[in-house]
Amino acid sequence: MTRTLNDPITIGGITLKNRLIMAPLQQYKGTAEAYATEHHIEHYGRRAKHVGLIVLESTAVSSNGRLWANDIGIYTDRHVEALRKVTDAVHAHNTPVFIQLSHGGRKSSPEVTTALVAPSAIAFDDQYGMPQELSAEGISSIVGEYRMAARRSKEAGFDGIELHAAHGFLIHQFLSPLSNKRTDAYGGSSENRARFLKEVLAAVRDEVGRDYPVIIRISATDYSEGGLIPEEWARMLKPLESELDAIHVSTGGIIPVQPSDVYTAYQLPHAAAIKQHFEIPVIAVGKIYTRSLADRILEDGLADVIAIGRPLLENPDYAEGMLTVRGTAGSVGEAG
């Protein structure tokens, strides 16, 4: 059966009107107290008309885990009202919106973080500085912050949650052997390194129930020997598949190393490798900006959904063009 960008798809009980979603990209427009602003209401509402789903930018579950000093958070009940105005603006276009929940761990903003924490006392770089190794009590406290963030996400009107386990932030830090050198129940084997994610996911599910969509964003490769690769991700996530509704595949971020070449659809091979192991939908992202290429990816079964980010920053109506313009299918690695 031929699949195209215009075809609907169901993720966790919510049917998207098409397979094009807006990827999370930071706006750097939050207040000092991490509240969403009129910018967020206008920005997401303006882009909601054509896409099948909007995933809000990374939203901190803890005051001590904000990624930047001007990002947004959901770590108090007071954050809910401002975020509800954002979800209302998106829902005005009959488009669902997910929130991306995150904790920066050792990559939290030094400007607003009082105590940098991580699974192990290993610095990302000199700019961030040396984190404290989390105690078992500290881990439990952060799991509780994810729980409360999930509760508030429903109160704010979000239709689902994306857990940010990519780009070198806290969940990713636990999962990767490059950043997790623990010798207790949270380190060592793949199963142990996935324990923090398992506990976060269980806490979130306990709050929102099984019928509420929960997806995960991962970095399928750490771009370094000894780091994560798709096959290890499959070993860690397969036992959790029944509790997840989709996997959003990105790459990198655990160490200050960039991919050697960033070309059109450069992350697609990793998404395709992940997809081989799972039944739930896989979302591909990374310079997939033409309708022809998106349709080719879907038709070939390399991914189930396409996410775009930067073109929508420059042109709020970019999605309309992708969904209406048909052409000859391109190939992975084409210029553009």
Image: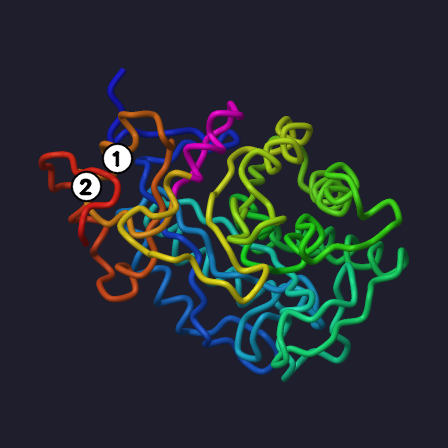
Residue shown at 33% from the left, 30% from the top: 8
Place of residue 314 in the rendered image (x, y in percent of width and height, measured from the top left)? 24, 66
- Look at the image and say whether residue 268 sits in the magenta stretch: no
Quadrant for the C terminus in the image: bottom left
How crowded pointer 1 is (Cα within 10 Å; few <14, some 14-19, many 20+) is rated as many
Place of residue 9 in the rendered image (x, y in percent of width and height, measured from the top left)? 38, 29
- Look at the image and say whether residue 279 sits in the magenta stretch: yes
Which residue does the numbered mark 2 point to in the structure image? Answer: 291
Q: Is residue 53 left or right of residue 298?
A: right
Q: Are marks 1 and 2 in contact (CB under 8 Å)?
A: yes
Place of residue 121 in the rendered image (x, y in percent of width and height, measured from the top left)? 78, 67
Q: Which residues are magenta?
A: 270-284
What's under tag 2, amino acid-wise?
Arg
Residue shown at 31% from the left, 46% from the top: 265
* Image coloring type: rainbow
Vertically, is 207 above or below 11? Answer: below
Which residue does the numbered mark 1 point to in the structure image? Answer: 5
